């Protein structure tokens, strides 16, 4: 059944077709490039950290012949690169990930709805974002992907200043997605800020737990190799993932 009949007809010689082994895993990496991802108190902004992490994941997936695609998003789906499994695909992905600029607002639920039209088959979906969005709507969209038997992994990327709020002097806080500004004494708003942050993080964490969605909170002050190794080793122990264990 593998005889190439067209070649036989032209040359009167028998040739057998050879096929590349089809990948067992089809993965998409969705990267948030909205304005808030440009924040950074250390050496790397959230977007730079996330883009580097995305590049590492692309490399790991491609090195085991899995197909990986890339989606950049903010308010809309900005760029879509369909999954491919060839090693040469890595350079195309790295070129897109290099020198990204954070700008605009975020609308992850709308982007997920748009992406669903491009993702007809069961896949591994990895999202890197600070998730400063409408969490109930985000979870609703993610549950729809889970119902279609997709595996979903969220890398929740936050800066240490966002997590710890170490400000101690009169500070002008500026929105990175619109023109809003607030001049405040940090000591007067710290408790309410930390309470709101805790509520936001718990809503996302609990929603992921109930929806059987992997949720990984990463502080950008954590060395990237350490964060990635912790993620991979944990998934290895839990036997949740094939790409965390293959070499």
Image: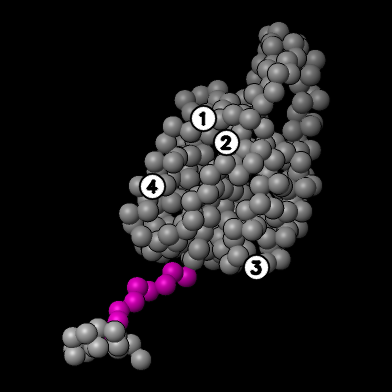
- Which structural element holds mark 3? loop
Mark sitting on residue 101: 1
Which mark is first along the chain, 3 or 4?
A: 4
From which residue to which does the magenta span run? Answer: 16-24
Look at 29% across and 84% down and name the residue there: 6
Between the residue at mark 3 and the residue at mark 2, the CA separation in whole angstroms equals 27 Å
Residue position for label 2 = 33
Mark sitting on residue 149: 3
Which mark is first along the chain, 2 or 4?
A: 2
Q: Is residue 111 left or right of residue 59?
A: right
Between the residue at mark 1 and the residue at mark 3, the CA separation in whole angstroms equals 33 Å
The quarter of the image holding the C terminus is: bottom left
Q: Is residue 225 above or below residue 11?
A: above
Look at 58% across and 26% down and name the residue there: 39
Mark sitting on residue 3: none
* Nearest to the observer: residue 19 or residue 163: 19
What is the x, y in percent for residue 112? Answer: 66, 51
- Which structural element holds mark 2? loop
Look at 53% across and 34% down and name the residue there: 47
Circles 4 and 2: CB distance less than 8 Å? no
- Is residue 160 one of those drawn in magenta? no
Circles 3 and 2: CB distance less than 8 Å? no
Give residue 118's quadrant in the image.
Answer: bottom right
Q: Nearer the viewer, mark 4 or mark 2?
A: 4
Residue position for label 4 = 92
Is any part of residue 106 visible from this angle? yes
């Amino acid at each position: 059944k593998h005889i190439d009949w067209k070649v036989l007809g032209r040359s009167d010689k028998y040739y057998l077709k050879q096929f590349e082994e089809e990948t067992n895993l089809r993965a998409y990496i969705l990267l948030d490039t909205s304005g808030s991802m440009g924040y950074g108190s250390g050496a790397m902004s959230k977007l730079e950290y996330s883009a580097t992490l995305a590049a590492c994941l692309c490399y790991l997936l491609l090195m085991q012949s899995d197909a990986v695609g890339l989606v950049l998003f903010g308010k809309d789906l900005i760029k879509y690169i369909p999954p491919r499994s060839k090693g040469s695909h890595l350079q195309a992905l790295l070129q897109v990930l290099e020198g990204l600029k954070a700008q605009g607002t975020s609308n992850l639920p709308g982007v997920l709805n748009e992406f669903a039209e491009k993702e007809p088959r069961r896949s591994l979906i990895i999202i890197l974002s600070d998730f400063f969005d409408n969490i109930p709507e985000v979870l609703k969209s993610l549950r729809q992907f889970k119902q279609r038997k997709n595996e979903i992994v969220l890398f929740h990327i936050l800066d240490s200043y966002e997590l710890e709020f170490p400000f101690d002097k009169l500070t002008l806080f500026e929105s990175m997605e619109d023109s809003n500004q607030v001049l405040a004494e940090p000591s007067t708003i710290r408790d309410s800020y930390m309470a709101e942050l805790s509520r936001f993080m718990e809503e996302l964490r609990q929603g992921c737990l109930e929806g059987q969605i992997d949720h990984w909170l990463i502080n950008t002050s954590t060395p990237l190799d350490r964060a990635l190794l912790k993620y991979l080793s944990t998934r290895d122990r839990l036997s949740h993932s094939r790409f965390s264990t293959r070499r």
